[in-house]
Image (cartoon, rainbow, N blue to C red):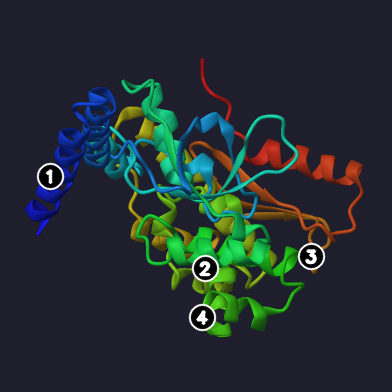
Amino acid sequence: MAKKKRTSLFSAAAHVAQTSEASDPQPAQNLVDERLDYLSDLKSRKRLPSTQFEVEPDDCVIWDKHNRIYDRLDVENCADLIAAFRAVGRQQQPALVRRVPGKKRQTFEVIAGVRRLWVVRYLRKNGFPDLKYLVEVRDELADDISAFKAMEAENRGRNDLSAYEQGLSYKRMLEETFGGNQTALAEAVGRNKSTVSRYMQLAEIPPAIVDCFAELSQLTYKQGPKLLQTMNKSKLSRSRMLDEAAEIAIIQREAKQKGEAPLSGPVVMKRLLSSVEKRGGARGPLAQFGPKDSPHLQVITTNPKGFSLFVPHDSGATPQALLGYFEEAIKQFHRQEKP
């Protein structure tokens, strides 16, 4: 079928050329050239649908309710997309954007396609200086609910979108757009309320704990409630888990600097959960200062790198008293390095 269409196209062009040759040969030749150019452009995808454009990445801003954490994107978690762009020399799937009104320069707000934007910006600095960002302008996404639904449809099921990012997006939309109506939010994304609620629980996990996972995708949909339940057993449990997260984060940073493999998601999860029981164990804190029934300061752990303290916000101790307790803790647990 493709060959027949191409033959008829060139036959029509040739017929026009023959009938016009005597009176005006130049327009006929132009018509043939235009047809050839059009076929060539279709093959190279230089001509795009009327709603699609190749734009400068600097003319795009990211929608503030987008479900990607841009700062967590890097060469490792965008490697597949970088390879795909390099293989064909361009972006093939357009990002969804809407126009930003009131700007002197045409500006687009990215609804879906932030990862593609990151890759275009990266490649422009690494071998593809003229690479443009392919966008599809969707003026019907002017309101945030329509934009949210389009973003959900575009990103649903993508392996590179973490459950944590999804939870943050749901929580932000619930508070800022749906007025706290979780039923309306669930209907908008086509999920039941319990599923949406479970995703939003991930958004309650402190950033310090999230940061100790090498990749956001390692913090899964099922792990969030378990982490929160363990961490929120008591103020002391929360303090212990945060201390463990700080130590894990140091290990992860050092591994990245040395080019070594980071701790895996299951290993990080196991360490976080077990930290609540192992730190201090059945003995409780290593030392405490202030009233016995409600201590003002506790020494929780000690190791070669240092020791950790816990000070309840509602202890009632004055700053002067806390400084005194801290000096006592220093005398007991601080190790002076030998010269």
Which residue lies under the disc numbered 2? 227
Tell me the kind of residue under disc 1. Ser
**Earlier residue among tags 2 and 4:** 4
- In the rendered image, the vertical position of residue 102 relative to residue 96, given as above or below: above
Report the front residue among 96 and 215: 96
Instruction: Single out the mark in the foreground, 4 or 3.
Output: 4
Q: Tell me the kind of residue under disc 3.
A: Lys
- Is tag 1's residue or tag 3's residue first in the polypeptide sequence? 1
Estimate the spatial distance between the alpha carbons at disc 1 and disc 3, rounded to whole Å.
98 Å
**In this rendering, would 326 be left or right of 88?**
right
Is residue 11 visible in the rendered image? The answer is yes
Q: Give the number of the mark in front: 2 or 3.
A: 2
**Residue 278, can we see it?**
no
Q: Nearer the viewer, mark 1 or mark 4?
A: 1
Q: Residues within 10 Å of mark 4 (few under 14, many from 20)?
A: few
Q: Nearer the viewer, residue 20 or 9?
A: 20
Give the Cα separation between the discs numbered 4 and 3.
Answer: 50 Å
Identity, as a three-letter code, of the amino acid under mark 4: Arg
The amino acid at mark 2 is Leu
**Mark 2 surroundings: few (<14), some (14-19) or many (≥20) residues within 10 A:** some
Report the quarter where the N terminus lies. bottom left
Q: Which residue is mark 4?
A: 191
- Residue under circle 3? 292
> Which image quarter: residue 128?
top left
| Secondary structure at numbered mark 1 | helix
| Residue 264 in the figure: left or right of residue 330 | left
Q: CA distance from mark 1 to mark 4?
A: 55 Å
Q: Which mark is residue 11?
A: 1
